[in-house]
Amino acid sequence: MLVLLTGASGFIGRHLLRALLAQGHTVRCAVRNPERMRASFAGARVEAVHADFVRDLEPEAWMARLQNVDVVINAVGILREQGDQSFDALHARAPCALFQAAAAAGVHFVVQISALGADEAARSGYHLSKKRADDCLAALPLKSVIVQPSVVFGVDGSSARLFSMLASLPLIGLPGGGRQQIQPVHIDDLCQGVLALIDQVHRADEERPVLAVSSDAIPNLTEAGEFQSPAPAAPRLAMVGPQALTLRDYLAQLRSLLGLGRALFVPIPQAFVRLGASIAARLPGSLLDHETLDMLERGNAADPAPFARVLSRSPRSVQDFLTHQEASSLSTRARLDWLLPLLRVALALVWIVTGIVSLGVYPVEDSYALLARTGITGALAPLALYGAALLDLAIGIGILALKRRRWLWYAQMVLIAGYTVIISLRLPEFWLHPYGPILKNLPMLAAIWLMAELDGRRN
């Protein structure tokens, strides 16, 4: 079949694309950068067309992309709004336009990747916007299913990275004691479930071809996990793991899976958690803000039986989420996710404190005496002293503030190497100083080189 997939460059979309291709389907990816998609899947059964969920808010914008399409899968989603990428546009208005166009184009089946919690009790902007699209789809004369996954785990997923990082900490802080309920589902189970739903509809259409879908022919799931018709609305299918876990238990199981030993937990009062969420919301790339915190507090669990019937087996448990090789790789990455920022702050403090000390905390006359021994005297002495101090401060602030720092790491290495050469020639006794002021340049250089290689690549 020809499947139109939106969100193909995202976490869930990437996995669905591979699963659909492995099943023999042809996939038309509606993405913002079709050239990159074509380059990534050259020779595969992949078509790439341009689409922009920020601007494609009317059904007419989608009609050409739906030509000859059998199935539509909407996997577009953002966890935080940024710039013109709003929940309203990406989660509600654009998907509704797509669904309306699919109904007009005679598409056989639509799968909406929504979220557990997008229901009548929804409070967050994320859940409310997802619910608007879900309700729009449910009201249309289309064969469709609304998939509502809990927290989705995959080694390349942002939520897996966040929870793994938290689980790897030497001391794990738990908001409210970690009593929140979640029911993580593996990305491969989600993809297999979606493929199973598509296969059921495909087999049903082969047995009884459908030329047009009327409003009294909207499918529903039977107790056997199959579609029946007629039905009052598109079915909601919760895709969840085999059992609900508290946040504390989930992190403990992840830590064990990563081979990091027993977890040490400390409960954090909710007031401090909310303060931390306010700060984290201002950090680029952070997944924590008041909305995600409210979503966690609400809980994320459901009955796994309907999903198990679709899979024809029980969804995998946390203990089966990772292979040994994946666990080893994720364990290293999880620890780097907090160790690298810690090292970055430590290096920044070295430069900042050094600059402050050079500006007058250390006796200025003693600083001039050291400069004189290197050949810097007269009017050049204050210029060298205060210029170097301000440069140190600027480097320290740059380490903390700049988003792209690779050039700054190399600049530090050159500067430290220069300082080391000058002092070695003019003040060689500092190599034999009991506190090792010059010898410490060696681990500094090694740490900065490490940051240049890893931090630069990650950015």
Image (cartoon, rainbow, N blue to C red):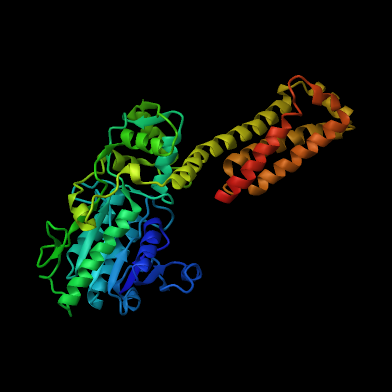
Residue 278, placed above or below residue 8: above
Closer-to-camera residue (386/209): 209
41 horizontally vs 416: left or right = left
Residue 201's quadrant in the figure?
A: bottom left
Residue 145 horizontal/vertical position (percent): 21, 62
Asked whether, in this view, residue 454 is left or right of residue 133, the answer is: right
Q: Quadrant of the N terminus?
A: bottom left
Labels in figure, total: 0
Q: Residue extending furthest front?
A: 324
Q: On screen, 23 above or below 422?
A: below
- Image-quadrant location for residue 54: bottom left
Q: Residue at x 43, y 39 (%)?
A: 258
Residue 36 in view in this figure: yes
Task: Check the image and report above or below for 15 versus 404.
Answer: below
- Outermost residue on the top side: it is 434
Hey, which quadrant is residue 67 in on the image? bottom left
Q: Is residue 438 left or right of residue 290?
A: right
Query: Which residue is drawn at the image coordinates 58% and 42% (left, top)?
Result: 401
Would you place residue 378 above or below residue 310 in this image? above
Residue 277 picture location, percent across and down: 39, 37
Q: Position of residue 336 (x, y in %)?
A: 52, 40
The reply to whether residue 286 is in sight is no
Residue 351 or residue 150, whichever sits in front: 150
Q: How far across and down, in percent of the image, does residue 218 sit?
A: 14, 67
